[in-house]
Image (spheres, rainbow, N blue to C red):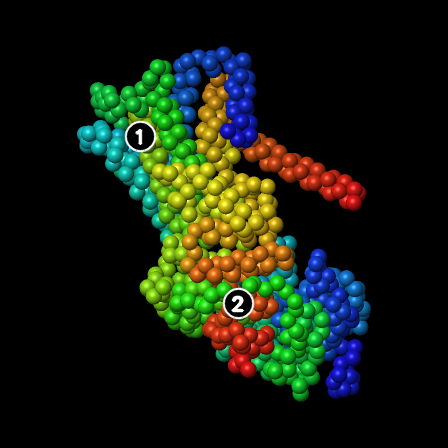
């Protein structure tokens, strides 16, 4: 451990937790590579890094869900090669996840002591409700809760629910509380409350690891910041050196790698195809979004996870309703009441979750491709198998879908080929606006390059392409323009001459680009 | 015909052969005609249920609808002396309305099919009993409707017309379910409603249409049942018929999760159920055991089918592993 800051080395406290040389690989990916860090009692560590930097893997290792390949974890003076879930809980590590794990139908006290309820004497072992509440009350007081132990969880706000999670952590005498993106779905006033709770934990000598994309919050509460990049420790910042620019610099810190890029645009962008004005999504009902997508361009939509991009895509495709605002397609007003309306107008979506919403795994390739346009593949309302097969054969050849035949069940294909089937069903129709949400997630490099090529071909044919992606290199390599979302709003639009990872990241955290 | 359907057909033939050997009366024309009449009545009902189950829904009010619409039909023609074709059209329209209402509650107001149709089950039977003041709806002495009686309870070339009606309906519905655009949508929605929606299908309308089809076929069978029994006491008429219909679909290879099953399957399921009923009568099994026999056979049938699937999956995996090992060794 060689931290550059002398004040930390000089600290007399023994660390509660230290990781030393932790490495974890998954097939084809090194998720963590020789990562070391330590956490002292009562210390608040801000853990930051881009999507995919290795934060989730680190959490899984600390939670005992997965074992590192090499390296050691020392908790409270005891060194382990890897934790089990029981060992993790037993040594006082508690998690508060982004998605809360509360039973909404139970009250606060029942949630805090779930599975550990105080019981009444007697053969029936009934739950002692009075004692349950009495035990919960002081815990709630410690986290500064302004609600009582018998409030149903469903009546609490998100921040209050997080307080319950933290109270639950305190109830098992947690010594390290790990907060994973706790503020990503909180409004600002609620965030302040949560940051207050973190300070209260610190005052009690409990350590906190605070994972967040919201750098200004990290700035406010962290005693030390640990930056992860590509599974490695990119650097640590002592309290005095914590500032926005330093964090961003460490998060990026590398040159653009050599990679497959989509070809340059062969044509100047055309007129505005889809224009949205002041639409608001359910995720951020108080933030209006304005956005124009032009014919012939690939507009990259960047932003951190939870910034509202997928919500926007779902509204543009008519799956979710927008709160107010208006849509225009080629200058004409558009009403989007359902996905069927969007499809009828040539607005297509390649959704983020391929297996749940992109395709029907049980149907054949041909049946998937014809599904959105079945009436065109039928005569007198009867499906024409030969027309279906003909369309599918053409798409199979055009897109290079690797499958024994178009009658093959889609579920048996690889991720890349499944994604091509999703694309094929829309390409077989006449797209005007093509929205792709994380189009290359979980897809191997070869298929990625093919999908980039297809997107460029579409744009060159005059289609307006909107690509949502969390892969920074992809956004910069493929897009003609980049719009960045931050907390439900477009925080800025970059033209090609201002493309840089730093600029995208600055906009993504709500700062102005350079 | 799928392998599943073929297995069911073989089962029907084997059971039939065994019953015929033990009691040759099974093959008497009068017994066959009676059984095929019942197959006709229950078959029409079950096809309607099948359309709902394919979407992942369920229709529990079928038996009560048979009671209510049957009561109304007899009341219309016997008491109110309505022309029977008019009464017929009215009853079918009522069935469609009930289906539309259920579909609307389920797709627009997002209520669970089980809840909506369970309430229907209670409501329609209550209304039917109230309508007749808990009495019996029947024809007065000497009342005759020759054409209607011929079409519903009569025979052509010794075959009950209700059975012929089932065959005609089955052929039409087979085309709708297995060949039409609408049928494809039904399967797609049953397999994965979200993905169907993301393909631009108006899933709400399609599901609603399935409930309307179920309502219409139920109304039609209600008329057949009414003309078969000729007198209806609404407290018991049609009781448990929804379960016969669901059982036929399940036996026929339908998954209650939706997206699976064939028209031939539900037909064969109906045939097997009626064959079992007949078996209970002919083999001198106490008729109080009727339901127990049905339940037992369905349980065994579903169990065998499921275990067979597990066995085949395991064998496939073993083969793949063996191939993989051999491949690795070759390298």
Question: Residue B213: x, y in percent?
Answer: 36, 39
Question: Residue A91: x, y in percent?
Answer: 73, 68
What quarter of the picture does the C terminus of chain A occupy? bottom right
Disc 2/disc 1 C-alpha distance (Å): 65 Å
Subunit ID for the residue under disc 2 = A
Above or below, A127 against B218 in this view is below
Indicate which disc residue A29 carries: none
Question: Residue A350: x, y in percent?
Answer: 50, 57
Q: Is A457 displayed left or right of A501 in the figure?
A: left
Residue at 53% over, 17% down: B17
Q: Is A40 displayed left or right of A313 in the figure?
A: right
Question: Residue B24: x, y in percent?
Answer: 49, 12
At numbered mark 2, what does the secondary structure look like: helix, strand or loop? Answer: loop
Q: Which residue is mark 2?
A: A479
A367, B21: nearer the viewer: A367
Quarter residue B32 falls in: top left
What quarter of the picture does the N terminus of chain A occupy? bottom right
Q: Residues within 10 Å of mark 1 (few under 14, many from 20)?
A: many
Residue contact between numbered discs 2 and 1, judged by CB atoms under 8 Å: no
Which of discs 2 and 1 lies nearer the camera? The answer is 2
Above or below, B320 against A343 in this view is above
Count of all numbered marks drawn on residues in the image: 2
Quarter residue B49 falls in: top left
Subunit ID for the residue under disc 1 = B
At numbered mark 1, what does the secondary structure look like: helix, strand or loop? Answer: helix
Residue at 55% over, 63% down: A263
């Amino acid at each position: 451990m060689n931290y550059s800051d002398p004040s930390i080395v000089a600290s007399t406290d023994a660390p509660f937790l230290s990781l030393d040389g932790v490495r974890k690989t998954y097939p084809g990916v090194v998720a963590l590579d020789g990562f070391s860090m330590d956490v002292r009692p009562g210390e608040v560590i801000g853990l930051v890094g881009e999507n995919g930097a290795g934060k989730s893997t680190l959490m899984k290792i600390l939670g005992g869900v997965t074992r590192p390949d090499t390296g050691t974890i020392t908790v409270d003076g005891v060194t382990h090669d890897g934790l089990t879930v029981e060992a993790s809980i037993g040594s006082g590590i508690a998690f508060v996840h982004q998605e809360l794990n509360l039973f909404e139908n139970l009250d606060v006290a029942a949630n805090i002591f779930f599975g550990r309820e105080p019981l009444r004497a007697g053969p029936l072992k009934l739950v002692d409700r009075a004692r349950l509440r009495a035990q919960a009350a002081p815990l709630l007081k410690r986290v500064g809760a302004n609600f009582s132990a018998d409030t149903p969880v469903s009546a609490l706000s998100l921040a209050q629910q997080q307080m319950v999670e933290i109270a639950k952590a305190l109830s098992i005498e947690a010594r390290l509380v790990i907060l994973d993106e706790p503020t990503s779905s909180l409004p600002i006033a609620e965030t302040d409350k949560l940051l207050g709770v973190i300070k209260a934990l610190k005052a009690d000598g409990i350590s906190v690891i605070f994972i967040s994309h919201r750098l200004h919050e990290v700035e406010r509460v962290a005693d030390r910041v640990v930056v992860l990049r590509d599974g490695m420790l990119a650097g640590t910042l002592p309290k005095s050196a914590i500032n926005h620019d330093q964090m961003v610099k460490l998060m990026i810190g590398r040159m653009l790698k050599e990679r497959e890029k989509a070809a340059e645009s062969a044509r100047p962008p055309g007129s505005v195809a889809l224009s949205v004005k002041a639409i608001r999504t359910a995720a951020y009902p108080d933030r209006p979004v304005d956005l124009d997508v032009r014919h012939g361009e690939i507009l990259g939509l960047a932003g951190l996870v939870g910034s509202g991009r997928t919500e926007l895509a779902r509204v543009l495709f008519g799956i979710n309703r927008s709160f107010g605002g208006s849509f225009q397609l080629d200058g004409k007003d558009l009403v989007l009441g359902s996905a069927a309306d969007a499809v009828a107008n040539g607005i297509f979506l390649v959704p983020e979750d391929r297996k749940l919403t992109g395709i029907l795994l049980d149907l054949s390739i041909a049946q998937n491709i014809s599904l959105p346009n079945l009436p065109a593949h039928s005569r007198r309302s009867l499906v024409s198998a030969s027309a279906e097969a003909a369309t599918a054969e053409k798409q199979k050849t055009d897109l290079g879908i690797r499958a024994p035949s178009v009658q093959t069940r889609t579920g048996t294909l690889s991720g890349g080929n499944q994604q091509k089937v999703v694309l094929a069903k829309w390409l077989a129709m006449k797209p005007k606006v093509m929205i792709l949400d994380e189009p290359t997630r979980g897809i191997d490099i070869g298929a990625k390059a093919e999908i980039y090529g297809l997107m460029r071909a579409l744009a060159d044919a005059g289609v307006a392409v909107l690509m949502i992606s969390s892969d920074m290199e992809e956004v910069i390599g493929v897009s003609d323009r980049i719009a960045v979302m931050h907390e439900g709003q477009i925080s800025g639009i970059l033209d090609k001459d201002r493309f840089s990872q730093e600029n995208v990241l600055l906009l993504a955290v709500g700062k102005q680009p350079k | 015909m799928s392998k599943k359907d073929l297995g069911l057909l073989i089962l029907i033939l084997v059971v039939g052969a065994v019953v015929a050997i033990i009691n040759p009366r099974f093959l008497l024309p009068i017994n066959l005609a009676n059984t095929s009449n019942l197959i006709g009545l229950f078959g029409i009902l079950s096809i309607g249920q099948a359309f709902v189950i394919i979407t992942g829904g369920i229709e529990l009010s079928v038996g009560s609808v048979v009671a209510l619409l049957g009561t109304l039909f007899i009341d219309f023609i016997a008491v109110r002396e309505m022309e029977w074709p008019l009464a017929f059209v009215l009853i079918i329209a009522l069935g469609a309305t009930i289906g539309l209402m259920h579909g609307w509650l389920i797709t627009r107001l997002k209520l669970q099919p089980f809840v909506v149709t369970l309430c229907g089950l209670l409501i329609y039977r209550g209304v039917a009993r109230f309508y007749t003041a808990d009495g019996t709806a029947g024809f007065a002495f000497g009342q005759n409707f020759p054409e209607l009686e011929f079409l519903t309870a009569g025979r052509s070339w010794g075959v009950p017309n209700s059975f012929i009606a089932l065959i005609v309906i089955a052929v039409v519905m087979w085309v709708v379910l297995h060949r039409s655009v609408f049928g494809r949508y039904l399967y797609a929605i049953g397999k994965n409603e979200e993905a169907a929606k993301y393909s631009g299908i108006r899933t709400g309308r399609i599901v609603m249409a399935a409930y309307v089809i179920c309502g219409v076929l139920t109304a039609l069978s209600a008329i057949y049942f009414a003309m078969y029994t000729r007198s209806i006491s609404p407290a018991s008429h049609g009781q448990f018929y929804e379960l016969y219909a669901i059982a036929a679909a399940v036996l026929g290879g339908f998954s209650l999760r939706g997206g699976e099953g064939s028209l031939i399957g539900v037909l064969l399921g109906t045939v097997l159920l009626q064959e079992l009923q007949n078996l209970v009568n002919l083999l001198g099994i106490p008729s109080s055991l009727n339901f127990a026999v049905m339940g037992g056979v369905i349980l065994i049938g579903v169990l065998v089918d499921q275990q067979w699937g597990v066995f085949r999956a395991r064998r496939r995996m073993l083969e793949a592993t063996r191939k993989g090992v051999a491949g690795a060794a070759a390298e």
